Image (spheres, helix red, strand yellow):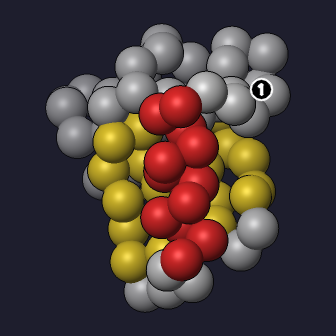
Amino acid sequence: LTVIFIHDSLVDPNGKVLSNKYSSQVFKSIKENPQVKLVLSGGLHLNRIRKANSSYLVVSSSSTSYPCTFKVI
């Protein structure tokens, strides 16, 4: 299993998956690598979870800082 950490969110504040050049590249990597099961991102100060294909997209205000509001790690 593979976890990807990225800075920019793949989900907008309304919870919709973004479709731009950056997110297209990430989704291409996810599609080419089915072992990717979790994508953790920040960039927005909100908490969202969406499923895309067989991966979960988790957006948190911070995935590694303490205290993290979503407590991912």
Instruction: Name which quarter of the figure residue 6 lies in.
Output: top left
What residue sits 49% from the left and 51% below the top? Answer: 26
Neighbour tally class for label 1: few under 14, some 14-19, many 20 plus, Cα within 10 Å: some
**Residue situated furthest front in the rendering:** 21
Amino acid type, residue under disc 1 in the picture:
Gly
Q: Helix or strand or loop: what does disc 1 sit on?
A: loop
What residue sits 61% from the left and 71% below the top? Answer: 31
Work out whether residue 25 or residue 38 is closer to the camera in this orientation and state it: 25
Residue 30 point in image, percent of width and height:
54, 67
Work out whether residue 13 or residue 64 is closer to the camera in this orientation and state it: 13
Is 62 situated above or below 28?
above
Mark count: 1
Q: Is residue 63 left or right of residue 61?
A: left
Residue 33 point in image, percent of width and height:
49, 80
Q: In which quadrant is the N terminus drawn?
A: bottom left
Instruction: Name which quarter of the figure residue 65 lies in.
Output: top left
Q: Let me know if residue 8 appears in the view.
A: yes
Q: Let me know if residue 68 appears in the view.
A: no
